[in-house]
Image (cartoon, rainbow, N blue to C red):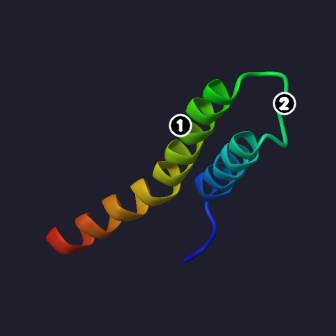
Amino acid sequence: MSIQPLDVLGGLMFLAGVLLITGLIATGSTSSQRLETGAMLMVLGTAAVAGPRAYRRALDRTG
């Protein structure tokens, strides 16, 4: 399977979420804000990568 633009975007979003949660970026904000935003970036990054693939697999099974 070739790398799609959403794979790159999702990977970057996930990495940004990890860096945000660990405090390596945006050190001036509170930890609860970093945790909330970082977790959201990780979830959205995972969905950006996994969503289209799961949708394509479901279409292949039914079609």
Marks 1/2: CA–CA distance: 17 Å
Which quadrant is the C terminus positioned in? bottom left
- Which residue occupies 74% across, 46% down? 22
Residue 57 place in picture, x, y as percent = 31, 70
**Amino acid under label 2?**
Thr
Whichever of callouts 1 and 2 sits on the residue coming sooner in the sequence is: 2
Q: Percent position (x, y) of residue 47?
A: 46, 50
| Quadrant of the rendered image containing residue 41 | top right
Position of residue 31 relative to residue 24, above or below, is above
Mark 1 falls on what kind of element? helix
Q: Front-most of 53 and 32?
A: 32
Which quadrant of the view contains residue 31?
Answer: top right
**42 relative to 8, above or below:** above
Of labels 1 and 2, the one closer to you: 2
Residue found 60% across the figure and 73% down from its top: 2
Q: Which mark is residue 40?
A: 1
Residue 51 lies, in percent from the top left, at 40, 54
Numbered tag placed on residue 27 in the rendering: 2
Q: Please tell me whether mark 2 sits on a helix, a strand or a loop.
A: loop
Q: Mark 1 Cα within 10 Å, few/some/many (few <14, many 20+)?
A: some
